[in-house]
Image: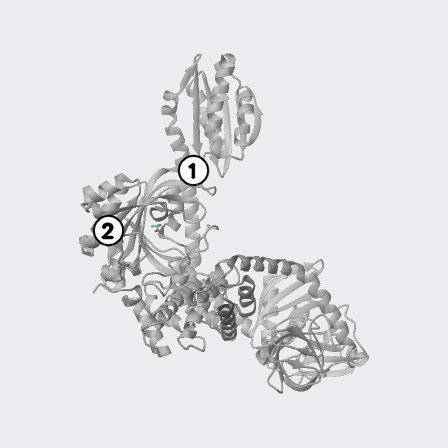
Amino acid sequence: MLLVKDLRDSYIEFFKSKQHRHIHSSSLVPKDDPTLLFTTAGMVQFKPMFAGTIPLEYTRATSIQKCLRTSDLENVGRTKRHCTFFEMLGNFSFGDYFKKEAIEYAWEYSTVVLRLPKDRIWVSVFENDDEAFNIWNKTVGVPAERIVRLGKADNFWGPAGDSGACGPCSELYIDKGPQLGCGKPDCKPGCDCERYMEYWNIVFNQYFQDTDGRQTPLPQTGIDTGMGLERLATIVQDVESIFQTNELKQLVDFVCRELNVKYEGNNIPAVNAMVEHARSLTFAMTDGAYPSNEGRGYVLRRILRRALRFGRMLGMKEPFVYRMVDEVVAIYGSYYPEIVSSAKNVKNVLEGEERRFLETLEKGIDRLDEIFAALSKNGSGKISGHDAFLLYDTYGFPAEMTSEMAMEKGFSVDMEEFSAEMEKQRERGKQSWKGADNAFESAMTELAKIGSGTVFTGYAETETAATVAALSDGRQVIDALKEGMKGYVVLDKTAFYAESGGQSGDTGEIVFGDGAVFVVEDTKKSSKTFVHHGYVKKGTIRKNEPVSARIDIVRRSLIKGNHSATHLLQAALRQVLGDHVKQAGSFVDADRLRFDFSHFEAMSVEQIDRVEQIVNTKIWENLAVSAKEMKIEEALKTGAMAEFGEKYGEVVRVVSMGEFSREFCGGTHVDNTGKIGVFKILKESSPGAGMRRIEGVTLKGVADRYSSLESIVSALAAEFNAPEKDIVARIKDLAAENKSLQKEIQKAKSANLASNLDTMIAEAEEIAGIKIIAQTFDGASADDLRVLADTVRNKVQSSVVIFASSCDGKASLLVAATRPAVDKGADAGAVIKKIAPIVGGGGGGRKDLAQAGGKDPSKMKDAVAEGVTVFKGIIK
Ligand code: ALA
């Protein structure tokens, strides 16, 4: 049996034997093409070569391209042939061979190399493409009854993205047999059933479509083909579905084994979807797309959430998709080495994403079931956009997922209303900053009035037994907050540090005796009252109830490390830069630290290195850290550093680290500098006159940074096909090569323009003894035009030149006349004045030379034609 990997090799070898250059897959995230979220076809990396905007190094190429398409997302897993990620086998011609060879190659590869049965292959051509029909029928010998003519929807392809090459196409189908068909008598390619499976698309690129949808002939015709590797494998391996081909099947088996389910009945689409989606996510995240709420990232989020929903149907309760990554790597890593080095990072991100969504998935499904029940009762078939929006907003259900789940039950979603709700939310978002601030301020003032302030226990404890002193929903002080509500909680005492002195507030949970939970997302203080911000995750919470206030220990421990590091940093800066260094502000959270200080000039690299070294030495000396409250005068006598411009009370807290650092500070710290782990400066800059800012990381921040640099370096190593140590040299080489290529292009361009000159002159019209040389160019600059016009004027004594060119999206015009022509009445300035407005510009000049620019190069031909007319008018 031919394995998928054999197909990869055989395809590439076949086209290499037909003089095609093998080009590697480009990234799934297209470079330099803002109109495309993902690479959707093999031709994407060749778009400029089809459009003729760059010089061609070769005219035939073949590739296996990683592609991602989500237009059929809701079908993936349910059908035997749909994927989001797939590998596209392709052969391409840029102004080289055209229809005949492209069709013959496809036929030869299908029937001679793969030995597919000729009588099961059907083809389609574009409705009026007799040329392609005849090649199939007469040259190749496919009987007319197996050639179908289809319309624009099926047999016209492109462009990929907003603009680019496109053209009519011809597709190859395999007849999988009547047992898979719909049974209709006229079932044939183009029918939606599973009988005829399209496997190869040959596009005859003839047009360039611009962003307004206008099509103009390409400077050269081209061939772009695409064959889905997964589909081809089902044919060659004689299996029913892509999920039974040897590579995807390995993933199917993994899921069935690990989740302990059988591949049968309703499990099949669920397992398929998980397999397919885990593969897509691994590849897309490797190429630098990450789940998020927007654009590319939201596509990935939708894919992942869909996988999790199917996983739940298979009984999956814990994050699982991330565990499939290693399996994907085991299968595809040898052909796509980039996924090997990114696996660790991809798994980390996936696991976090999965965990967060699984927290709300179950509840969302319960809510959806209630909605279904209500719909059945009132006989309506449609989920309102409002409900779909709540599912999205509260439980993270992408609207498409809700819609798919509704579909399974025979319902639909009012997507229009959903979009309207989304829009409203965007509006609210824009306005909410101010509103939220006001509501928060008034809640804080109200809350601050209650009691005599919160006792802070968090220097010693991470968990404190306390009582609820007050609650607010952000507008008013109330007695209870219900599940799902956002609000503020004040306790009589708390272990949560409230944001101050640059240290960010703690997060964690306030747990009630009856199991109710308030999630604390931030802690702030108003005067002496600590206010916990967050939402009720479970149950109803009430005033006066006993609770346990538990901070997120890991986060706090990272914050402590970062905060203590800023103290060491300040002492080290004073040592290296001098005693004028004083703290002017700082910020620390779990991820990073920032320290602003008075200093007059940028630090040198050596100074930065020394500061970093001193801080690390002090960390590794394991200095004991202690905090002591004392009267302010006493504290000042110890030489403790106070923050610039900060007001302190009677009693202050002094934090000391061995003998090295002593500062006024109310924050939380490690008890031993060794616990900071390691310190790294990331950036030195100036936040304002006379001030410098250092941004840095410790422990986890350093580890995170290391991982991200590591993946960048290995991506570079893979991209440039060089070991790590040689990457820089390799990039330098490429840059030099690029520069010299640019020069060559320039040379070739000039030579090319000049070479057409003689024909241009020979073909020029002559009026009253004056030759009119009128011509348009692509890519010639205003300077190029001038040089060219001079050459013409030197060659033809009595002549007028009317040139237009499009260059970098703009038009340039040039009109010139030789002395003898001027003497006969020619006037370049008068002509240009008339024609410049046609290309959306203006300009003027002398009788012998005039130039103008314009915004609209698409009109340059009209401008030149009009120029000729105007000129004739002047002469007569
Ligand atoms: N670019 C063509 C396609 O994607 C081959 O179908």
Picture coordinates of residue 166 (x, y %)? Answer: 37, 44
Pick the front one: 630 or 578: 630
397 over 221 or under it: above or below:
below
Q: Nearer the viewer, mark 1 or mark 2?
A: 2
Amino acid type, callout 2: Trp
606 over 668 or under it: above or below:
above
Amino acid type, callout 1: Gln
Q: Residue at x 47, y 43 (%)?
A: 211
Pick the front one: 386 or 579: 386
Pick the front one: 111 or 574: 111
> What element does badge 2 sit on?
strand
Pick the front one: 9 or 156: 156
Disc sitting over residue 746 in the figure? 1
Quarter the N terminus occupies: bottom left
Going from N to C along the chain, the mark reached first, 1 or 2, is: 2
Disc sitting over residue 122 in the figure? 2
> What element does badge 1 sit on?
helix
Q: Quadrant of residue 718?
A: bottom left
Q: Residues within 10 Å of mark 1 (few under 14, many from 20)?
A: few
Q: Residue at x 70, y 71 (%)?
A: 474
Q: CA distance from mark 1 to mark 2?
A: 47 Å
Q: Residue at x 37, y 78 (%)?
A: 259
Total numbered labels placed on residues in the image = 2
Q: Is residue 458 left or right of residue 29?
A: right
Picture coordinates of residue 654 (x, y %)? Answer: 73, 80
